[in-house]
Amino acid sequence: MAIKQITVPHLGDFSDIPIIEVYVKEGDSVAADDSLIALESAKAVTDIPSPYSGTIVKLLVKEGDLVSEGSPIAEIEVAEGEAPPPPEVKQEEPKREAPPATKKRLHRVCLPV
């Protein structure tokens, strides 16, 4: 059995997000994708899932704590054969440049006389 640390995943450009609920305690068995904690940002409440199946051996947060991307949540004992979660793909929105200032263009049309 191996001990792995669970951290807060990428949540956008947010930091110091309060934990409003902790769903697990030390000794609990969890499956991959089971919710561990709930965070409340200015826009939404987000559940943070476990990336592994196993047993929570140490809880590193409590309600009211402020967390950011990479903050440790818990330590979990996982089976040796369990594969690590796939790497998180960060999708960045393409940068949109402001359209150039529009100028009225006059088109000259030559008509035969």
Image (cartoon, helix red, strand yellow):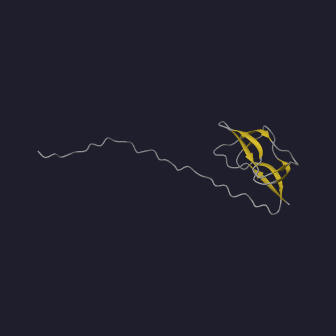
Residue lying farthest to the right in this orientation: 27
Q: Position of residue 112 (x, y in %)?
A: 13, 46
Left or right: 90 as drawn, with respect to 65: left
Looking at the rendering, which quadrant does residue 101 occupy? top left
Residue 14 placement (x, y as % from top left) = 66, 43
Q: Give above or below for 14 relative to 4.
A: above
Q: Quadrant of the N terminus?
A: bottom right
Q: Position of residue 30 (x, y in %)?
A: 82, 50
Residue that appears at 77% across and 48% down = 34
Extreme residue in the bottom direction: 81
How many numbered dots are placed on residues in this image?
0
Q: In the picture provided, is 22 more to the left or to the right than 13?
A: right
| Position in image of residue 28 (x %, y %) | 86, 48
Locate the C terminus and report the quarter of the image it occupies: top left
* Left or right of 78 in this view: 45: left
Residue nearest the viewer, comparing 3 with 86: 86
Q: Nearer the viewer, residue 69 or 83?
A: 83
Q: Residue at x 81, y 42 (%)?
A: 23
- Please name the residue shown 80% across and 41% down the image: 22
| Residue lying farthest to the top in this orientation | 42
Res. 81 image quadrant: bottom right
Q: Is residue 8 left or right of residue 92?
A: right
The quadrant in which residue 82 appears is: bottom right
> Front-most of 74 and 51?
51
Q: Is residue 65 above or below residue 52?
A: above
